[in-house]
Amino acid sequence: MPKKETDKYWDPVLETLPPKKMKDLQFKKFKRIVEWAYLHSKLYRRLYDDAGFKPEDLQRWEDISRVPIVQKEDYRQAQAKDPWPYGDSLCVPLDDVTEYHQTSGTTGQPVYQPDTWQDWEWWAETWAYILWAQGFRKSDRVFIPFGYNVAMASWASHYACEKVGCEVVPGGILNTEERLLKIKELKANAIMATPSYIIKMAETCKKKLNIDPRELNIKKILCAGEPGANIPLTKKRMEDAWNTKVYDNAMATEVGGWGFECTSQPGGLHVNEAFFLVELVDIDTGDPIEELHIPGKIVITTFDRYAQPCIRFDTKDISMWGKPCECGRTFRILKGGVHGRADHITKIKGVLFNPLSVEEVVRSTPELADEYLLEVKEEDAAEVLILKVEKRPEVSLSREALEHNLARQLRLKTNLAFRIEFEEYGTLLRPEVKVQRFKDLRLKKVRG
């Protein structure tokens, strides 16, 4: 039955399924993908045999935690084997693979991602849930500014837009100024990009084109790739700059589009539970976390992707469970979305430190530009935290006063002292893709 623009849900049955029925459905799907992987993937068979686990050991929900967790490095090692390039992780004949993508490689050798045509249709369907929940409809003209390369995001969002009926404008080959002019020319009313690039586009619009981005009449912005769209002050900066709503979502090349913010903006992400099992586990022990407001590591299983299954994948991202959303979806909420990465949370001078806490301070300081760089290094056997920022050129406040105020706010937020270095306005990198703003340069890293 064709969708109507007034329909609230993409799939009203699954999105409002009672939690008990959803859990039963998820367990059925979980058993199915575990059995498939054990039969068809040498990687998973080896992983499970080494742990003494068999698919028939899955008898009840609590048995899920017995299934070994897979790491990104497991895929890398498996893909070093034949058949090239997918190796032991491939579960279908090589001739059945119709789509190739890969991870960004920001944490090491990229992981290659094969998909069959069925898998690719599944991708579009998972993203259709996301887009519909954020108000994307047939009447929208969506501008996608990224280059269409081996990365997944642009392709997945493009085909999902087409699935829900949107008109798509691919702007990858253009530079930022040309993209903004094309948005203005075609009256595009929606954009998809990383938070960093949305901020850069607004800045370029004002500084280079002398256009207020609010005059472009963008009706909605979808952000992914970085946690910023669920950091309240970063979200506010974007929404104020464009005078529109900014929505967060979460995806990974190995996993899929697993989390999304709806138009109710519940202060977190819905888990796309029809297609994914998202678990929170204790960072140290791996024990399941079901209670609200307790941080844990996100472990994800993708139910319906068969060329290269993803079962209990360690995302290394951190979040916590939150209260249900008022939108009526029964999909669970991760409060605050993704809070950061477990491998970025570290001890500095004996204090547990989350780099995203610095973003909240920088983005709440109106005298500062939006970009910053954070480093921790050893100097004279002491750990030093260095924050590199840019002062906005129109600000009259002295650097000394600004440095004093900023250092005080950072101390209150993190209980740590920072060395603040001012860079010339516009010199810090403003990349189009996701940004790594935290660099741990210590010779011997200390983890919490």
Image: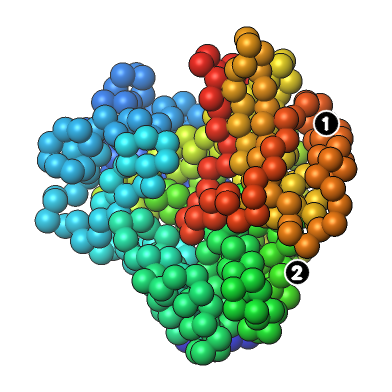
> Which one is nearer the viewer's eye here, 326 or 112?
112
Mark 2 and mark 1 lie on one chain; the one further toward the N terminus is 2
Give the CA distance from mark 2 to mark 1.
27 Å
* Residue 250, x across and y down, in percent: 54, 54
Residue 303: in sight, yes or no? no
85 sits to left or right of 69:
left
Nearest the camera: 24 or 45? Answer: 45
**Secondary structure beneath label 1:** helix
State the image quarter where residue 88 is shown.
top left
Color theme of the render: rainbow
- Label 1 packing within 10 angstroms: few (<14), some (14-19), many (20+): few
384 in relation to 155, above or below = above
Residue occupied by mark 2: 240
Where does the C terminus fall, quadrant-wise?
A: top right
User: What label does residue 411 carry, if any?
Assistant: 1
Tell me how many marks there are: 2
